[in-house]
Image: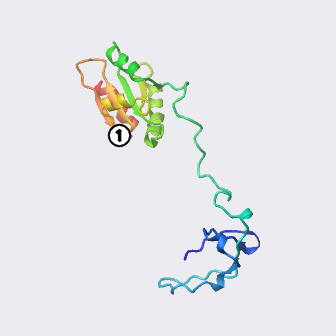
Amino acid sequence: MALFHCHALHNTMPTLSPFLPFASRPLSVSSLPNPSPLTHQQHSYPLSTTITHTTNNNLLSLSTLPRKLLCKPPRGKYVREDYLVKKLSADEIQELVKGERKVPLIIDFYATWCGPCILMAQELEMLAVEYADKALIVKVDTDYEYEFARDMQVRGLPTLFFISPDPNKDAIRTEGLIPIQMMRDIIDKEM
């Protein structure tokens, strides 16, 4: 039997039992059976606390206890209108690939629920500032463009495609979170 330690007023703590309607009398901690002796260390805990049942109006629930957030929740999607890396549809991407460009095209396949995609979005934004006139970086949401992602054989997120403006060069594909320096090397040396 496991006991949960919780701070409650007047040294009483309502139990979190599914059998609450069947309880008719308060349960004292001293009336609990003795656990087996500890083998490594003996711990002494105060046993003066009395566990009492409350009425259905005052049930202690984990959802009513105050919570402390470990970090601030996100303010929204990480693809906004003021970002340099724009989200495009499959048709817009195909027009960019077929059209004439003087700069390499970097396509980021992402999903809004993907943690590494959020980290990659921050790095791509910094890269878009650094390579403002030297590269074109766009995003494709795989949840909305599922068929296009399937046709491009995107199996892991994030997936980046580096497409050179030279049609004779092959596209470079990466899967997973990659460092920003590796992206710089691909743009500078391979494109």
Query: On the rendered structure, is 52 left or right of 127?
Result: right
Q: Which residue is drawn at 46% across and 43% down?
A: 115
Q: Is residue 134 visible?
A: no
Which of 70/91 is in front?
Answer: 91
The quadrant where residue 14 appears: bottom right
Quadrant occupied by the N terminus? bottom right
Q: Which residue is drawn at 46% across and 39% down?
A: 119
Vertical placement of residue 96 versus 119, above or below? above
Q: Is residue 1 visible?
A: yes
Q: Which residue is drawn at 48% across and 37% down?
A: 112
State the SS at label 1: loop
Query: On the rendered structure, is 65 left or right of 178?
Result: right
Question: Type of residue at label 1?
Answer: Gly
Which of 85/52 is in front?
Answer: 52
Which of 8/166 is in front?
Answer: 8
The residue labelled by disc 1 is 156
Q: Where residue 79 sits in the image (x, y, percent)?
A: 51, 30
Q: Where residue 178 sits in the image (x, y, percent)?
A: 37, 39
